[in-house]
Image: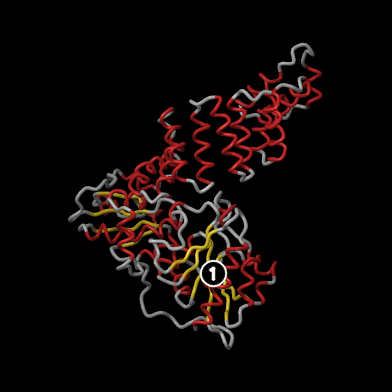
Amino acid sequence: MAVGLDNVFANESAKKLDFYSDGFAARQAGNLDAARTLFQAQLHATPDHAGAANALAEIEVNAGRPAMALALARRAIVINDRPAHHWGMLGAVYASLFQFAETVKAMKEGLDRQLDHPKLWHNLGIALYQENRPADAAKAFEMSLAIAPDQHDCRTDLGMAYLAMGDLQTGLRHFEARWHKLVKQFVWDLGIPEWQGEPLEGKRIIHHHEQGFGDTIQFMRFAKDLAKRGAYVLAAVPPSLVGVAKTVPGVARAVPYDKLFPGDFPTDELRSFDYHTPMHSTVRWLGLDLAEIERRVRRWRPYVRPPGPIPTKVAASTGTKLRVGIVWAGRPGLDPDKERSAQLERFLCLTEIRGVQVYSLQKGRAGDLKKTGGDVAIIDLDGRMENWLDTADLMRRLDVVVSVDTAPLHLAGALGIPTIGLCQYARCWRWLRNRTDTPWYPTMELVTQRTRFDWTTPMTYVKERIEQMVRER
């Protein structure tokens, strides 16, 4: 129940004015409305109460009101700039505004006041990573872990920093800490040991999905390595990816991961498996490093291989020289979507190019086409994509795919289709840093934002690149 500010003053002794302690207790109890009112009362009664200003800043930023939070965090520091956590709060507010250079400055100010503050080191590392400085980020994460070793989130972030630097083995070792928060599929409850590099000759192993669709498409390729070691490989993936997984070399059988329940799956068959392995962890226990991934590029073949010849091209207007598939947004509701997704308007420039027919490979965003008028010039393929194998079939009919960093980008790469990947300013670890190519998909070119949230320069390049392809036709 919310507490009215007038009631607070009416019910408390004017001499007490200890609303801050009551507000802190309310916050600890999860009653944020009451806490906000009590901290506000404290600040009204004693305007120079830095603790109340700082506490209100935290509530405001978590409530999605960063402008007010920034004013309060700055006020707390003006009143008292000595506590390290005041600077930490200011840095957190800047981070919510994606102003990570300012976050770095604030965290360093806080650490100047309290060097053994693990949360400040952790948050400094996050900001440095967002500033495309993974090596510096790793040092900050390691400082945090040296002070407080049992921080699973920090260790996971350290893993991603090493992965972004191309150190797969060190990165994946730390990245195992992800299981502290990541939801484990039912396969973990079957009593089957997790594979950790043991010999696989004559063994049966479940190679299973663990995170997003794109992760699974990227890492299902390593079923072939398991099979080469003599294993029978069962791929357990999301239902819509089963058709794709069946085409991957090394996969003996593919099933929906949500069917690995006794009753849905023969119990005796489940007991016959010797190991299970999450797809990211597979790379670790295979002992693969970036140098090996780079070497494989030279003898690389597409590993998603739908049966049959490449289908006939999709319909296009007379004079079409190049069929371009586009994906402008990731799955809504995910935190990375705020930065990785673009707006359809950015892609409309491709419809200006003579000889180009544009096709939408975007799922569930037909409203964007109608809203922008894009449906006039862009052919929507959404209704023909019931599952990922359908999408693969349609992609094979196109000449090039242009996509933001989401699962269709991985599928196009796995199919060996000429692909342009649009990456946000602080791009995902898997694309490394400062590269326009990727060892994961040799037919893919990467284009990255120069400024956070600004797709102008990347799309200018994409248009020029597509125009070049048309000329070459």
Whether residue 1 is visible, yes or no, is no
Q: Examine the rendered structure and indicate whether residue 243 appears above or below residue 268.
A: below
Task: Identify the image quadrant of the N terminus.
Answer: top right
The quadrant holding residue 154 is top left
Give the x, y percent position of residue 287. Answer: 27, 50
Please state if 409 lies on the left or on the right of 173 as rendered.
right
- Find numbered disc 1 in the image and state the secondary structure of the residue it sits on: loop
Q: Nearer the viewer, residue 309 or 242?
A: 309
Q: Examine the rendered structure and indicate whether residue 354 appears above or below residue 1.
A: below
Please state if 14 lies on the left or on the right of 266 as rendered.
right
Q: Residue furthest toward the top?
A: 15
Q: Which residue is drawn at 39% across and 43% down?
A: 175
Give the x, y percent position of residue 235. Answer: 33, 58
Please state if 216 lies on the left or on the right of 334 as rendered.
left
Q: Examine the rendered structure and indicate whether residue 121 appears above or below residue 267.
A: above
Give the x, y percent position of residue 390. Answer: 46, 71
Give the x, y percent position of residue 450. Answer: 57, 57
Residue linked to disc 1:
361
The crowding category of the residue bearing disc 1, from other C-alpha atoms within 10 Å (few below 14, some 14 to 19, many at least 20), is: many
